[in-house]
Structure formats: C-alpha cells, structure tokens
Amino acid sequence: SYVVTQPPSLSVAPGKTARIPCGGSDIASKSVHWYQQKPGQAPVLVLYDDTDRPSGIPERFSGSTSGDTATLVIGRVEAGDEADYYCQVWDSSMDHLYVFGSGTTVTVL
Amino acid sequence: VQMVESGGGLTQPGGSLRLSCEGSGFIFSRYSMSWVRQAPGKGLEWLSYISGSGETIFYADSVKGRFTISRDNVKNSLSLEMNSLRDDDTALYYCARCDPAATYAHDYWGQGALVTVSS
C-alpha cells in the first residue's frame, strides 16, 4: 500500500516561513491536498491539487511538489497558524483512493 | 454548505452502529462523499468513498468487509453501517464532501460523530 510520511512536529518563529514536507513514492505524479486542523475542530482544506488555494485561504499558503516530496509553505507565519497539518494523496489508480500523512504539528514560537 | 453527522454512541466489541450524515446547501447527488475518522489523539484516516450516483465505492483495508457505505440522494443522506466493531474503531467519525473541481479534495466536513467501542 502507498505510504505517506510527515515529520511529527515543526517549530517556527512569527513572521518566518514554515515548510512542511510530505513524502511518498513519485508523489509528484499524484494529487496532493493539505488540511489544517486546530484543536477541537474539523479539518479545513488549505490547498488542493498540490498548489491551488480554496477561496478564503490566505495567499501566505502555497505548495509545491518535486519527485518524492510535496511541500506546504506557510509564509509570514502568524500565531493563528498553529495547528496540525495533514497531507493527503489522491490517486484514482490506487485501490485505496486516498492516503493521509500522519500529520505535522506546527508550533509558533 | 453543511454536513451534520448523527448516530454515534457507545457499543461493545463485536457490536454494530449506523452513522448518518445529512448534507444541505448543495446539490447532494452531484458530489461524491467520504467517511474519515480520527482516533483520540491520533491522525486522520480515510475510510470509504462513494460516488454521487452511489455506483462507485472504495474502502480502506482496515474496514473492508466490516463497514458499508451507502447514500440516499432523495433524502440528501450518507450512511456508514459498521459491524464487528473493535476497540480500535473508537474514534470521531467525519463525513466530508469530495469536490471534483478540486481533484476530489474534501472541501467541506461535518463536525463529527463520536463512536466508542468498549466493554
């Protein structure tokens, strides 16, 4: 089965840039979505199809993919960005259709 | 757009529960839907997908053969029939809409239904 890996945690100072990696075999050939989840809340879609932002998501959130790594980039980090971030791989050719990464907790120092 | 889950509760190992999710604010039949769960303190786990027509269904290995997804487009309702429940099925269960314009990303989520499996 397809495995997606994320670092458990990441710390970043306010105003700096956070880069959250998501690893998977040839992930650049698949569609990667990113979700933000704050404590006690349902997940929120922040990026879809590697790089696209849903309406209402700040331009500070961007994404990229290359080879075996997709990356969520949060520019000019704010205290309100502190949350868990999950990548999700979608591939219609996969038996399992969707696979989530294990999530990365972003702490704003 | 809103999804509201119901049907969660406490059951013993080996028991059954049926979750429902009612969608509103969008044309329900035009969207695929998924169930996703989150065990206490753990990450997200995708469980099952059903197309808008109900003709295409996928399951994660962890629930295949035990859980059944279905939908009623007249009632704008999604269901998850859960059988042979185990302790590790304890989780918050979310229904989520899959947006074909966003490569089937889950663009809207319900608030979740809590399922507790314990003797």
Image (spheres, coloured by chain):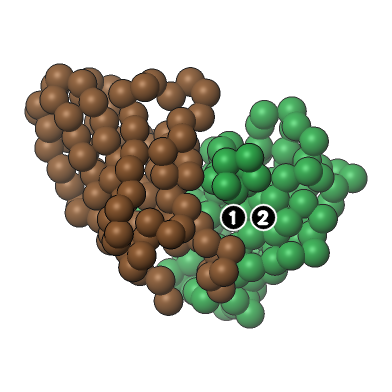
Chain colours: A brown, B green
Q: Could you tell me the amino acid type at mark 2?
A: Leu
The label nearer to you, 1 versus 2, is 1
Camera-side residue: A95 or A107? A95
In the picture, the disc for residue B19 is 2
Distance between mark 1 and mark 2 Cα atoms: 10 Å
Q: Could you tell me the amino acid type at mark 1?
A: Trp
Residue A82: x and y in percent read: 25, 31
Query: Which residue corresponds to the image point at 29% horizontal and 61% vertical from the top-left?
Result: A68
Query: Which residue corresponds to the image point at 73% horizontal and 41% vertical from the top-left?
Result: B22
The answer to whether A76 is drawn above or below residue B44 in the figure is above
Q: Quadrant of residue A78?
A: top left
Same chain assignment for discs 1 and 2? yes
Residue A36: x and y in percent read: 38, 37
Question: Do labels 1 and 2 touch, CB within 8 Å?
Answer: yes
Q: Quadrant of residue A17?
A: top left
Query: Which chain does the residue under circle 2 lie in?
Result: B
Camera-side residue: B47 or A100? A100
Query: Which residue corresponds to the image point at 58% horizontal and 37% vertical from the top-left?
Result: B108
Q: In the displayed orientation, state which residue is furthest to the right.
A: B74
Query: Which chain does the residue under circle 1 lie in?
Result: B
In the picture, the disc for residue A15 is none
> Of the residues under marks 1 and 2, which one precedes in the sequence?
2
Q: Is residue A10 left or right of residue A89?
A: left
Q: Residues within 10 Å of mark 1 (few under 14, many from 20)?
A: many
Quick check: can you spot residue B110? no
Q: Is residue A48 left or right of residue B96?
A: left
Camera-side residue: B56 or A52? A52
Residue located beneath label 1 in the image: B35
Q: How many marks can you see?
A: 2
Q: Residues within 10 Å of mark 2 (few under 14, many from 20)?
A: many
Query: Which residue corresponds to the image point at 12% horizontal and 32% vertical from the top-left?
Result: A12
Element carrying mark 2: strand
